[in-house]
């Protein structure tokens, strides 16, 4: 019984999604802290969907800036996860109306 001539090396890898590309592009020295904060921010929105304060991320906040804003591809990850930013200084969870952010 053979394996019908299929060699394990003949498979073509699927193209990475933009989210996968951004995740792989994170600098290794910042990745753990960045992903930990992204997880925390995401959990806050899931647990408290009506709380406006959790739906917006102030990118100029020093703690946020250190592990998201100033880390290459971190904001791209948030955008690929459905967050969007009506202004450059903050990014909002999907489902929030454009311009409804109130944090400066």
Image: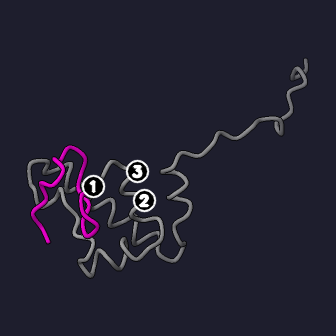
Q: Earlier in the sequence, mark 3 or mark 1?
A: 1
Q: Does the CB distance between marks 3 and 1 fall below 8 Å?
A: no
Q: Please give left or right for residue 28 compared with residue 44 in the image.
A: right
Local crowd size for mark 1, using a 10 Å CA cut-off: few (<14), some (14–19), many (≥20)? some
Residue 42 bears which disc, if any? 1
Q: Residue placed at 18% from the left, 56% from the top?
A: 55
Q: Secondary structure at mark 2?
A: helix
Q: Pointer 3: what residue?
A: 80
Quadrant (top left/top right/bottom left/bottom right) for the C terminus = bottom left
Q: Residue placed at 15% from the left, 55% from the top?
A: 99
Judged by depth in the image, the label closer to the viewer, 1 or 2, is: 2
Q: Which residues are magenta?
A: 86-104
Question: Residue 44 appears in which quarter of the rendering?
Answer: bottom left
Q: Earlier in the sequence, mark 1 or mark 2?
A: 1
Q: Pointer 2: what residue?
A: 76
Disc 3 from disc 1: Cα separation? 13 Å
- Is residue 91 inside the magenta stretch? yes
Q: Secondary structure at mark 1?
A: helix
Secondary structure mostly seen in magenta is loop
Quadrant (top left/top right/bottom left/bottom right) for the N terminus = top right
Disc 3 from disc 2: Cα separation? 6 Å
**Residue 97, horizontal then vertical, whole percent:** 16, 47
Q: Does the CB distance between marks 3 and 2 fall below 8 Å?
A: yes
**Residue 43, horizontal then vertical, whole percent:** 24, 54
Q: Secondary structure at mark 3?
A: helix
Q: Does the CB distance between marks 1 and 2 fall below 8 Å?
A: no
**Residue 82, horizontal then vertical, whole percent:** 33, 48
């Amino acid at each position: 019984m053979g394996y019908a001539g299929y060699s394990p090396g003949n498979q073509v890898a699927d193209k990475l999604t933009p989210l996968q590309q951004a995740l792989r592009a994170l600098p290794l020295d910042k990745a753990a802290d960045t992903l930990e904060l992204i997880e925390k921010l995401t959990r806050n929105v899931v647990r408290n969907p009506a709380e406006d304060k959790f739906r917006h991320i102030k990118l100029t906040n020093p703690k946020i800036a250190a592990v998201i804003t100033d880390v290459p591809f971190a904001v791209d990850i948030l955008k690929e996860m459905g967050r969007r930013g009506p202004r450059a200084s903050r990014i909002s969870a999907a489902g929030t109306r454009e311009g409804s952010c109130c944090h400066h």
